[in-house]
Amino acid sequence: MNLKDKKILITGASKGIGRATAIALAKEGCSVAINFKSDTKAAQEVLDECNRYSKGNILVRADVSNDKEVSEMCQEVKQEFSHLDILVNNAGIFDENDNSINVEAFENVFRNNFLSAVMVTKHSLPLMQEGKIVNVSSIHGRLGYGRPSAAAYSAFKAALENYTKNLAKDLAPKILVNAVAPGRVATPMWGNPDIKEQEELGQVHLIRRMIQPEEIADAIIFLIKNDAMCGEVLTIDGGMGLVTLG
């Protein structure tokens, strides 16, 4: 897929992986709809950076865990872009109260990390005749991975990977659906760690460092450009899986 002039929606694009992906796709010549929930300043900075490389980029504010706001966001995208070529479901949270029996945390993570992707996909598909969808999962979503203090997070990343595969079966060959499964990425979810903290947190990887958001963005672009991958979950975990279960 040639990405020049393609229309793209990225959720959770004001920070971290979403930010890096938006900028990387703008460098490819895409027009990017930058979704954000509340941090207008950070979103504007991403927009300004994207505008250095491509035209037609827009900001679309919406809480993607709210179906009404998702519907309104996609209507705004339709007005500005007329259609979508690519959707990147990136938005997500980590609930600090996550544990194996905290029902409230499970409900919160379910709505923000899994149901949000389903709702955004539902409202985006009428704008897509063909194209690509990439979901951002996690190595924690794999069978046996994760930890008790991330039980809900791990469970719903696993659900997202299963959803990715079934959505791929449903939409191919016109729309190809894949996912990425990162390890520990240096993003605000980890508290914007400094170099020393990144080295410490990265010891769970064989590469002995945290992964950078730009490295995940590169993988997302690879999946978007590749017309032979369908229903795949591309692991970029720095060897974390081998340390955990190897």
Image (cartoon, rainbow, N blue to C red):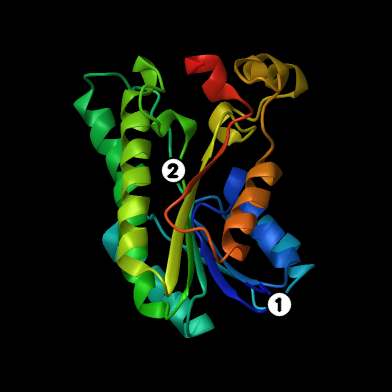
Q: Earlier in the sequence, mark 1 or mark 2?
A: 1
Q: Position of residue 181 (x, y in %)?
A: 51, 39
Please say if 35 is above or below 196. below
Please say if 215 is above or below 153. below
Q: Quadrant of the N terminus?
A: bottom right
The residue lying toward the viewer, choosing from 160 and 27, is 160
Question: Image quadrant of residue 141?
Answer: top left
Query: Badge 2 local density, few (<14 within 10 Å), some, or many (20+)?
Result: many
The residue lying toward the viewer, choosing from 139 and 93, is 139
Residue type at mark 2 is: Gly
Q: Are marks 1 and 2 in contact (CB under 8 Å)?
A: no
**Can residue 142 be seen by looking at this rendering?**
yes
Residue 55's tag is 1
Label 1 SS? loop
- Asked if residue 126 lies left or right of residue 10, the reply is left
**Residue at the location (52% across, 74% down)?**
85
Label 2 SS? loop
Q: Residue at label 2?
A: 92
- Asked if residue 234 lies left or right of residue 21, the reply is left
Q: Where is residue 167 in the image (x, y as percent from the top left)?
A: 33, 59
- Asked if residue 188 lies left or right of residue 46, the reply is left
Residue 96's tag is none
The answer for how far apart the CA atoms under marks 1 and 2 are is 27 Å
Q: Position of residue 120 (x, y in %)?
A: 36, 61
Q: Position of residue 42 (x, y in %)?
A: 63, 51
Residue type at mark 1 is: Lys
**Residue at the location (78% across, 69% down)?**
53
**Residue at the location (65% across, 15% down)?**
203
